[in-house]
Image (cartoon, rainbow, N blue to C red):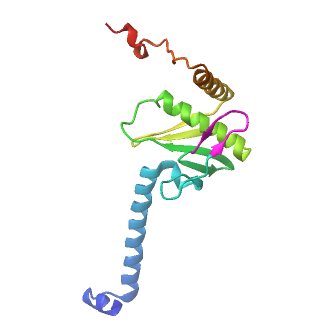
Amino acid sequence: MLYYLISIYNMNPLLFISFIIIISGVILIFVFNFLENILGSLTGKIIYHDATQLPGKTLRAKTLPLIGKPDYILKENGEYLPLEFKSGKTPKHPYSSHKAQLMAYCLLIEENYHHRPSVGILKYPQKEFRIKYTIEEESLTRRLVNEIIHLKISGEEPHCDHPQHNVNLID
């Protein structure tokens, strides 16, 4: 079959094989660029993945009543980093609820893998955000979890002072 293809194009067999190798290389470059644009950080080593077909293990905090399952945990330069995919419109800045979820995953990774992530990754359709997991972010996450627990136990309604969240200000 190969001989037939070579004879059709009246090529030297070595030239034909070289041509096929070059075309294959160009196709692979396009495929890898396409995958990198779509997957972004997923080109690193995936050590955890939560999917419908193969659910990941639920991570549990030891110091708080907090559990969760990030979409991915990547190992990058010896660090374990949570990566969370978000669908829908890509914002200019990450949504605060998405950031809070990601910081909770950072805390869960620190307590389960005994390595503190330096960042968490939010991947929207058009952009990827790497958000630093600082001591301040960890403290804010702990306060938020404790506030939610307090509201659940007390039965109080959540209250927010931001005008855009306070429906009583609308006439």
Up-down relation of residue 144 to residue 41 (above or below)? above
Locate residue 68: give its quadrant: top right
Up-down relation of residue 105 to residue 30 (above or below)? above
- Residue 25, position as x, y percentages in the image: 43, 69
Q: Nearer the viewer, residue 23 or 90?
A: 90
The quadrant of the rendering that contains the N terminus is: bottom left
Q: Nearer the viewer, residue 34 or 54?
A: 54
What predominant SS class does the magenta segment belong to? loop
Residue at 42% of width from left, 76% of height from top? 21
**61 magenta-colored:** yes
Residue at 31% of width from left, 87% of height from top? 11
**123 magenta-colored:** no
Residue 146 at least partly seen: yes
Residue at 55% of width from left, 34% of height from top? 101
Q: Nearer the viewer, residue 21 or 71?
A: 71
Q: Nearer the viewer, residue 48 or 2?
A: 48
- Residue 161, position as x, y percentages in the image: 49, 11
- Residue 66, position as x, y percentages in the image: 64, 36
- Which span of residues is magenta-colored? 59-69
Q: Is residue 141 left or right of residue 25?
A: right
Number of callouts in the render?
0
Residue at 46% of width from left, 51% of height from top? 39
The quadrant of the rendering that contains the C terminus is: top left
Residue 118 at least partly seen: no
Locate residue 140: give its quadrant: top right
Up-down relation of residue 152 to residue 121 (above or below)? above
